[in-house]
Amino acid sequence: MIRYSIVIPCYNEAKNIPALLARWEQVMERKDVEILLVNNGSKDESSETLQQWVPQYSFAQRLEIEVNRGYGYGILYGLSHARGEFLGWTHADLQTDPLDVIKAMEVIDNSPSPQHIFVKGNRKNRPLFDQLFTGGMSLFESLYLKQKLRDINAQPNVFHRSFYLSWSNPPDDFSLDLYAFYMARKADLEIHRFAVVFPDRLHGESSWNNGLAAKVKFIKRTLDFSTTLKKELAR
């Protein structure tokens, strides 16, 4: 029986994939977890790397998307193939330790109401500018959407399948983290946050957090989605 399904979208993560799988093997002591690694239309050798390495790990599965349609789309594609009672996602760049996902599972296992809990990381040890950027975005979204939304893009996210099945038109891009967090607040789920250390990437660079221009683009997309989300809720 699969209790937990964790989706990891991989976009141009060929150099990180072997270390990622090795780290998962180090922390994986349970047999009721599946890790779904989604090649999210990568332009590097991620597909070939996943084909080579995933079969060596019994807990891992590989999914393929030929053309990248967004970070959120990769996660949603993985969730649509998940078998677990509890679902979640995290990143492939090892800036969130797989051990943090195990900790999230333990929170759910020890909860008296596991179907009504949303577990999310809370990033620590980040550069000051990134902290200020995240704080500003969190403050705006909290005021605009009238829900307490702090460190919106922190990983991992883990929750019961019934919460996922309640979603309507989730976004395909980086706004998925905001959507899921906001919907958890609206559904009055218990929000459990715990500290996760956020180190530098081992290889490559972020597909969005790689300069001021990228941050401006991220802000615009997030604001556009927030406006759309608020209009939909007003109907």
Image: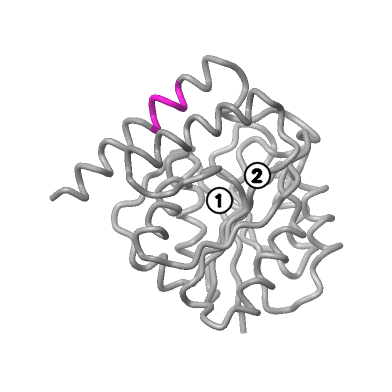
Residue 218 is a magenta residue: yes
In the picture of the structure, the residue carrying the numbered disc 2 is 47
Label 1: which secondary element = strand
Q: In this view, does 130 lie above or below 74?
A: above
Query: Residue 34 vs residue 180: left or right?
Result: right
Residue 73 can be seen, yes or no: no
Quadrant assignment for the N terminus: bottom right
The span shown in magenta is 217-222
Asked which secondary structure carries label 2, the reply is helix
Q: Nearer the viewer, residue 60 or 32?
A: 32
State the mark number for residue 64: 1
Mark 2 vs 1: CB contact within 8 A: yes
Q: Residue at the location (69% across, 61% down)?
A: 101
- Point out the tag, 2 or 1, that comes first from the N-terminus: 2
Horizontally, residue 172 falls left or right of residue 93, namely left
What type is the residue that disc 1 sits on? Glu
